[in-house]
Amino acid sequence: MSATDEKVGGSHYKDLAIQPIDYIVQNNLGYIEGNIIKYVTRYKNKNGVEDLRKARHYLEMLIENEMKF
């Protein structure tokens, strides 16, 4: 049994074909990108527009970080 098989604190990822954490890890994404994936993936089954706003916040941070370089 994998740690991703055990759900702690909700079931908003249980019916997905690919767990967000598996996608994030396998594609070597960073913290900010991972949070964007996480919030966009779960918004319909957890916090609705609030999660989309969180994803937008992280996307704005990512854009700001990319503009620095």
Image (spheres, rainbow, N blue to C red):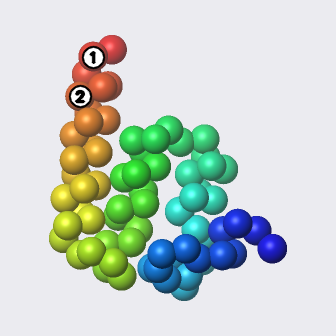
Residue type, mark 2 in image: Glu
Residue found 18% across the figure and 70% down from its top: 49
Residue 47 shown left or right of residue 3 in the figure: left
Q: State the image coordinates of residue 66 (x, y, percent, origin top left).
A: 32, 25
Q: Position of residue 64 (x, y in %)?
A: 23, 28
Q: In this view, which residue lies farthest toward the top?
A: 69
Numbered badge on residue 68? 1
Does any portion of residue 35 appear in the rendered image? yes
- Residue farthest toward the front in the current orientation of the protein: 9
Residue 34 in the figure: left or right of residue 58: right
Tag 1: amino acid: Lys
Q: Secondary structure at mark 1?
A: loop
In the depicted structure, whether residue 68 falls above or below residue 35: above
In what quadrant of the picture does the N terminus appear? bottom right
Which type of secondary structure does the marked residue at label 2 adopt? helix
Residue at figure coordinates x 50%, y 38% from the top left? 30
- Residue density around tag 2, few if under 14, some if 14–19, many if 20 or more, within 10 Å: few
Q: Which x, y percent locates residue 27?
A: 61, 46
Q: Tell me where residue 44 appears, x and y as whole percent.
A: 31, 79
Residue 61: image quadrant is top left
Mark 1 vs mark 2, CA separation in Å: 7 Å
Mark 1 touching mark 2, by CB under 8 A?
yes
Quadrant containing the C terminus in the rendered view = top left
Q: Residue at x 27, y 74 (%)?
A: 47
| Residue occupied by mark 2 | 64
